[in-house]
Structures are given as structure tokens and as C-alpha cells.
């Protein structure tokens, strides 16, 4: 598998008669990323007619050799797409699959086995990748390189299509499929994008439009020796290990740090070694949890790469956190998980898997604590947590039960090596 930070080449590979597979962009606003007019090239119309007229009886498209899949967004968004990616791989075993994604996923997936042949990091593009300013020249170079590859099928697994369908069109694929909101550009095959719908089911239903049958519902990500090696930053394995993650992409989904700390103490009292994990931007949160714990815990905020986090999840007896990327990643790796969810998000992002391994505790607060606005249908602009009132006892009860189930299901292991000073030596105390 190859990883390209940004594909800024390939235009020279186009045929001598000019950019026949180029979608010419007409700027209607100050940025070319908001409103576009697309001109279909002649080769694509011919290829599309051929595909439609000879479609296989099981729904699969004939002659598919190169597939592009757009799935940028957050870490959890990528995890939700894994079953659909696997379905594409098994339904089109002879095709090369190029996964177009964001920088974090690109780093995580480099050289990792999976239902893709290469991983390409997309350039900044409004509504697709918003972590840096969008540059017209960079985007144009990327799309020229993509068009030179002559994809047979481009799959939009990014969202409702307001921005991503324009992105998919500019790849120049012979056939396109994806979701669509009323304000999005149409694709050759599309289905409506409805918010309150399981993300995993959404993408499986989407690839079924091109004959890809699901082989499983639960996302799964393979763990590599490199992941386990990078997890060594957490220190040697110490008995039953538990990870806590107090962060989330939105403050609305964050359970208060003092409550996370209280659950951490309960788990430590049950004999677990506790690690508090988070990205570099979440160091204040991880430090707040460890500072409020009565028992020692290791603050790993900003200290692990995504690969190291995967390696730590691989050896964890339990992960406890919010509805966030790390919780979804832990489930995909195979760690037992407990997540605090806002009720409506359980419909879209809730775990799929056995209840003896994955559980949630829900908040049904649907009104903003600050202004009273009902939030299922709209936003009010405030950021106060919608899960703050989930009781510690409810989370601790489920966490201890999952930890006990895990401990009883595993064979006895060699006692961990303990540094002088006892089992708590080497762990940062609150």
C-alpha cells in the first residue's frame, strides 16, 4: 500500500489530445469551492452508458478496475466507513481501491493492512478538509492527478454532498455514487442523506447501490507490530489496564472531568491500572482528570501517536470515554468499551457489537442548558455539555461489570513487573 501526503503530479500522464477528462470549474463566488458548474467530458458519457447498459445481475458494475473512495472528516467518521470499505473490497476483489482521506487517517493507515491499496491525503477543500486554508492551485493539481488515473468508480462516503459531491465530480470517474441532500449536486447513483440514521448502516446501504454486499456490521481495524511498539511510551504492561478519554470534538459531548476522575478511582480500587489519554490539544483535560483522582493514574495527554493509541487499546481491558474518535477506534481494535452518549447520537454513532463488550450510558437532555433551545433539529450556538448530568454511579456500575467480564474471560497471565515502591510506583498521582 502506498501513502501520498498530497498527490500533486500525474497531469503529464494525460493523453496528448489535452485534458479530455478535466471538469472545468466556473467560479461563481470568491472561492471556487462554494458553487460550481461542471462540464461532463465526452469520454465519461461514453463510459457511463457502457456501464449502465451492461450492469451485472447482482448489481455489481462490470469492468471496474480502479475505485476511489472519499472518506475524510474525523477519526470516528473513518471508523464508521470500515464495513462498507470491506464490502467494496470483497465485491470487487480485482479492483484497486484508493482511499482519499485526511492527514490524521493518512498517518494512522500508512503501511497498515486493510480494504485499500493506497491512501491519499486530500488537499484542503471547503466542507471536505477544513484544517487549513484551501488553495486553488493545490486543489487543481490534485484533481489533475486524480483525473489522470481514470477511476472507473468514485464513491462519496463523506456526508450529504453539499461540498463532497463537487469533489467527487472533479475526480473524473466514469461512474459516481454517494449520498445527497437537496442542495447537493447529483451523482450517477445516490441515496438521500438523512441525519438520524446509523452511519455504519448508511455507508453499507450506499455501496449496495453498486452491488457490494456487507460481510459484517462491526468496524474492525488490524493492529500491527508498529502500533504495539509505539504503545511502549505508556510503559510496560501492568495487569488489567484501563484507558480513560475525557475529550470529544464538541464540548456538548464531554462528560465533566471530575466525573471521569471518579470513575477512574472506582476502577483503580478494583485493581486496574488507569491511563488517561488524549491528543495534545486535550492536555488540560487529561491533567484535570489525573489531578482530581485519589488514586495514581498515568497522564498520557499528547504523549501517544494514533498508532501508539491503537497499540494501547489492543492491550486494554476496557476503554471508558465520550462519544469520540478514540472510543470508536478502541471498538474497531477490539477493546471492550463504555461510552457516555447524548441520546440522539446513539442513533447515528452508537456501538455495534455484543453487550458483554460494548455499552453506553445515555443522556436524554435535548434542550440547551443555557437557553432552552431544543437541539435535535437545530443548534443554538452555545457549548455547554449535554451529558454533564449523567451520574457517576451509572457509568461506574457498567464499567466495573465490563471489567469483571473481561477479567473472567481471559486466562491467568503472569503478574506484571512492579517497580520498587509497590504497584503504584511509576504512575503519576493526582
Image: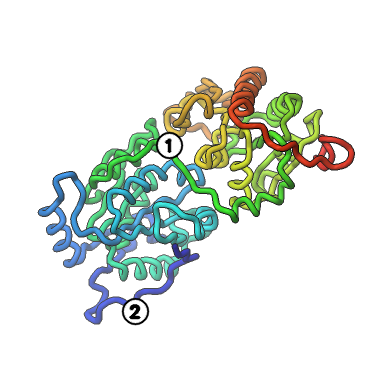
How busy is the neighbourhood of tag 2: few (under 14 within 10 Å), some, or many (20 plus)?
A: few
Where is 111 relative to 321, above or below? below
| Residue 363 screen position, x and y as percent | 54, 22
Residue 218: assigned label: 1
Residue under pointer 2: 12
Residue 235: assigned label: none
Which residue is pictured at 30% across the width and 58% down the height? 95
Would you say 293 lies left or right of 47 here? Answer: right
Which residue is pictured at 84% across the width and 39% down the height? 425
| Residue 116 screen position, x and y as percent | 40, 56
The answer to whether residue 320 shows anywhere in this view is no
Colour mode?
rainbow
Would you say 138 lies left or right of 301 here? Answer: left
Which residue is pictured at 45% across the width and 65% down the height? 2
Q: Closest to the observer: 380 or 329? A: 329
Whole-angstrom CA distance, mark 1 to mark 2, is 42 Å
Amino acid at each position: 500500500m502506498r501513502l501520498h501526503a498530497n498527490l500533486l503530479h500525474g497531469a503529464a500522464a494525460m493523453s496528448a489530445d489535452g485534458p479530455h477528462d478535466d471538469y472545468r470549474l466556473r467560479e461563481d463566488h470568491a472561492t471556487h469551492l462554494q458553487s460550481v458548474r461542471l462540464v461532463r467530458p465526452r469520454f465519461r458519457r461514453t463510459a457511463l452508458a457502457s456501464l449502465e447498459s451492461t450492469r451485472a445481475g447482482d448489481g455489481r458494475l462490470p469492468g471496474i478496475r480502479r475505485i476511489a473512495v472519499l472518506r475524510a472528516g474525523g477519526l470516528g467518521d473513518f471508523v464508521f466507513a470500515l464495513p462498507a470499505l470491506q464490502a467494496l473490497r470483497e465485491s470487487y476483489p480485482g479492483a484497486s481501491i484508493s482511499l482519499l482521506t485526511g492527514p490524521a487517517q493518512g498517518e494512522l493507515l500508512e503501511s497498515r493492512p486493510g480494504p485499500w491499496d493506497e491512501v491519499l491525503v486530500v488537499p484542503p477543500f471547503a466542507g471536505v478538509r477544513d484544517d487549513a486554508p484551501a488553495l486553488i492551485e493545490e486543489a487543481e493539481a490534485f484533481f489533475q492527478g486524480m483525473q489522470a488515473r481514470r477511476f472507473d468508480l468514485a464513491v462519496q462516503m463523506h456526508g450529504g454532498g453539499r461540498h463532497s459531491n463537487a469533489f467527487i465530480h472533479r475526480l473524473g470517474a466514469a461512474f459516481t455514487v454517494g449520498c445527497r441532500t437537496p442542495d447537493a449536486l447529483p451523482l450517477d447513483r445516490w441515496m438521500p442523506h438523512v441525519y438520524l440514521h446509523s452511519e455504519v448502516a448508511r455507508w453499507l446501504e450506499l455501496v449496495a447501490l453498486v452491488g457490494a454486499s456487507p460481510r459484517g456490521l462491526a468496524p474492525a481495524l488490524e493492529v500491527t507490530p508498529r502500533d504495539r511498539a509505539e504503545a511502549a511510551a505508556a510503559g510496560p504492561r501492568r495487569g488489567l489496564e484501563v484507558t480513560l478519554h475525557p475529550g470529544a470534538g464538541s464540548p456538548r459531548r464531554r462528560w465533566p472531568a471530575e466525573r471521569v476522575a471518579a470513575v477512574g478511582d472506582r476502577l483503580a480500587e478494583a485493581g486496574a491500572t488507569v491511563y488517561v489519554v488524549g491528543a495534545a490539544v486535550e492536555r488540560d483535560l487529561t491533567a484535570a482528570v489525573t489531578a482530581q483522582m485519589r488514586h495514581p493514574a498515568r497522564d498520557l495527554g499528547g504523549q501517544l501517536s494514533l498508532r501508539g493509541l491503537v497499540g494501547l487499546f489492543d492491550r486494554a481491558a476496557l476503554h471508558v470515554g465520550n462519544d469520540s474518535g478514540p472510543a470508536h477506534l478502541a471498538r474497531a481494535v477490539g477493546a471492550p468499551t463504555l461510552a457516555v452518549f447524548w441520546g440522539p447520537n446513539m442513533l447515528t454513532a452508537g456501538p455495534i457489537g455484543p453487550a458483554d463488550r460494548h455499552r453506553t450510558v445515555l443522556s436524554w437532555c435535548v434542550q440547551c442548558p443555557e437557553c432552552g433551545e431544543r437541539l435535535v433539529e437545530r443548534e443554538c450556538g452555545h457549548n455547554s455539555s449535554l451529558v454533564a448530568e449523567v451520574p457517576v454511579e451509572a457509568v461506574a456500575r457498567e464499567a466495573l461489570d465490563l471489567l469483571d467480564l473481561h477479567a473472567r474471560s481471559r486466562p491467568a497471565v503472569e503478574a506484571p513487573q512492579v517497580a520498587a515502591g509497590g504497584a503504584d510506583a511509576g504512575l503519576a498521582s493526582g
